[in-house]
Amino acid sequence: MLTSSLGAFAAPASADDTVTVTVTEATPAEAGRAASAGDPAANKTSEKANTEKKEAEPSRAARQRSKARKAVKVAKRHIGAPYRWGATGPRAFDCSGLVQFAWRKAGVRLPRTTWSMRSAVRKKVAWRNLKAGDLVFTSGGGHVGMYIGRGRIVHAPHSGTRVRIDKLDSYRKRTFVGAVRPGV
């Protein structure tokens, strides 16, 4: 307990003049304010809080993988929905409508057409580096499917079919024009 006498000209201290001080640890926000005010002890607390905050945040790649898992899950949930040219879901889809819908549910906005998707997404991916959630463009760029792993895609193939999972077979490899990784 700290005591201090209050009064003019060093008058004797009495019980009424006692002050009790309680010391608590500063919150990260308080530490940041104290550090900006120039308190050296607060600088260490502020640095510690900032380090802990950085460690708690997932990396950019981890955030992308999380979004990709969600997009794949959404696309798989719509297996069996009919193909309909120009349809963007949730009851019917065309190929780009399916991947646009799934990624939107994962929090990523994509343009509407296959060609605009391919050019808008900056992260380009080679055939051998495909990961779940990547958009795979085939048939001269006029078709898109979503890679789901193990050499398979989920897609809305063409009129008269339904959303389904297919293997990335020799035809798709032959007509492959590129792949992109949204959400990066």
Image: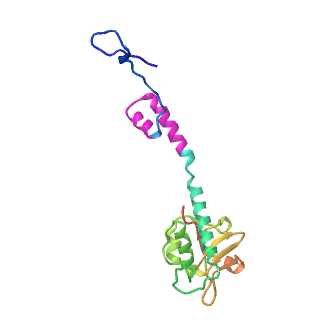
Give percent across and percent down for residue 70: 60, 66
Q: Residue at x 27, y 10 (%)?
A: 9
Give percent across and percent down for residue 94: 56, 82
Is 109 left or right of 181, judged from the image as shown?
A: left
What sort of colour scheme is used for the picture? rainbow
Is 26 left or right of 174, judged from the image as shown?
A: left
In the rendered image, the residue lying farthest to the left is 8
- Observer-nearest of 172 and 32: 32
Q: Residue at x 49, y 34 (%)?
A: 45
Residue 91 drawn above or below residue 7: below
Q: Is residue 164 magenta?
A: no
Quadrant where the C terminus is found in the figure: bottom right
- Observer-nearest of 83 and 20: 20
Which of the 4 image quarters holds residue 149?
A: bottom right
In the rendered image, the residue lying farthest to the bottom is 160
Give percent across and percent down for residue 10: 31, 9
Which of the 4 image quarters holds residue 81?
A: bottom right
Q: Is residue 45 magenta?
A: yes
Is 70 left or right of 10, judged from the image as shown?
A: right
Q: Which residues are magenta?
A: 29-53
Numbered-mark total = 0
- Observer-nearest of 117 and 70: 70
Q: Residue at x 35, y 12 (%)?
A: 13
Q: Residue at x 37, y 33 (%)?
A: 37
The overriding secondary structure of the stretch rendered in magenta is helix
Give percent across and percent down for residue 22: 45, 27
